[in-house]
Image (cartoon, rainbow, N blue to C red):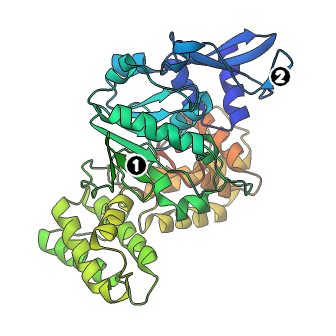
Amino acid sequence: MTLDDRSAEELAAQLMISPQAVEEAIRRGLLRFVKHRNSRCWRFGDTHNGCLRRLDGQPCDINGQCVKAEAETKGESWHRLIGLDDVLANDRREILLTPEGGKDALAALHFAAAEDTIREIGVVPALGSAVKPTRDDIEKLRGRRLRLLPDVDAAGQDAAARIGRAIATLAAETEIFDLKGLYRDDGEPVNDLFDVTRISYDDFEVNRDLWSITDLGSKGERVQIITDDQEFPPSPLPPPHVSPESHGFPVYPVSSFQELEKKLEELAEGNACTERDTARKRRWKLVCDLTAVEKGISRKLTADELMRTFDKWYKASAPYIDPEKSRDNYLAAFLAEIGKVRVPTGEGEALKKALESVLTLPITDLPEIPGMPEAHESWRRVVALHRELARQSANGVYFLSCRDAAKAHHCLNKDSAWNINHALASRLGVIEFMRVGDARPGGKASEFRYILPL
């Protein structure tokens, strides 16, 4: 393991963010580790600009003053945006712009990893809220879509408005994502994007706009679209267009167009509001049911199918929904939420059944692990859980989070389960990762394929 590898692991652990975010920043040439002022430091920057922080998280001592980060440049150079070379070299069309430094930029990559957009999203930080991007840097953003993620204080908001207006003159679309009113796990208010990595799962449930930070097509209540001279409310989202692989769970099977139409109508009416102040809950249940339908038919529902379903739900719910909100408000929320479902109706039951089966298996019936004849029971029960989920899946692919894997044995926690899963995949040939899971509580679980015989 090289010094950079050790430092990368140390940084991810110290910041409590996804190792994948750190690795991607290194891969893009935006992050490296250096010795500075007799301390091991991490540098976030490119050939034009950058800032340094101590790897141990302590402040830097500069002329008797403690500062959390040290910029490398002064004067006009200080205003250069970081990461534009990577954006141009890889023609990244959608950009997250963080006005205040490297930690927010790593947080942006953290969420890109969690939301499975890390290969597509460009990350462009500035060194502080006083930044005034040069005309040359702004020109490099021409025709791209940008989402600014400023600090919630007055300086951050002013920076977002100023930068947004400057970029909106030539960008395809410029958005500001508002983080005000959020709280971290410890009860402290969120001040910046990095603080959002400290938000609990329950708060992500309440603030569903946070489930698509890197999805510039998501236009929840926290997103403002700006132009060079005005701000205006967002328009409804376009329909989803990517078809996921079906996992074969026996939920809402349909075999014809007529059956599908009937099922969608039943779901719309069955999830309609029957009392006041239940619209969010009933609508969320509807989108979970619709996501299960999509898995059952192995494709995304079309725009027309979604709109007909929404119209039936809205008409049936009309006597009980908020008269102050327009149909478009409810439609925008419906279309945004349809892409945020983590557990479609039925999948939670599949995991529950698999766990019940594994926990009651006698130790003699647990699978053997190749190369580990004396494997601990906890390892073998994790393997048994993978095997059971694979048996339930029509195509052998299934989801499993570390938290759920830890339920296979009383001595496990999410971290030990994570280590076991990676050992089973990388060294022992028991499973393989089809997709690495989200690095935040409540995010999508990892997707696996079981390799051993069922």
- Residue 185, by quadrant, is bottom right
Using the rendered image of the protein, determine whether residue 364 is visible from the camera's viewpoint. yes
Circle 1 packing at 10 Å, graded few (<14), some (14-19), many (20+), is some
Total residue callouts: 2
Q: Position of residue 334 (x, y in %)?
A: 34, 66
- In the displayed structure, 227 sits above or below 163; it is below
- Name the residue located 60 percent from the left edge and 67 percent from the top edge: 356
Looking at the rendered structure, the kind of residue marked 1 is Gly
Badge 2 is on which residue?
65
Q: Nearer the viewer, residue 165 or 210?
A: 165
- Residue 62, by quadrant, is top right
Q: Position of residue 150 (x, y in %)?
A: 53, 41
- Name the residue located 23 percent from the left edge and 79 percent from the top edge: 312
Q: Position of residue 308 (x, y in %)?
A: 19, 72
Q: Position of residue 123 (x, y in %)?
A: 46, 29
* Mark 1 or mark 2, whichever is nearer to me: 2
- In the displayed structure, 43 sits above or below 108; it is above
Helix, strand or loop at mark 2: strand
Report whether 102 appears left or right of 238: right
Disc on res. 396? 1
Report whether 189 appears left or right of 109: right
Helix, strand or loop at mark 1: loop
**Upstream in the sequence, badge 1 or badge 2?**
2
For the N terminus, the quadrant is top right
Looking at the rendered structure, the kind of residue marked 2 is Gln
Circle 2 packing at 10 Å, graded few (<14), some (14-19), many (20+), is few
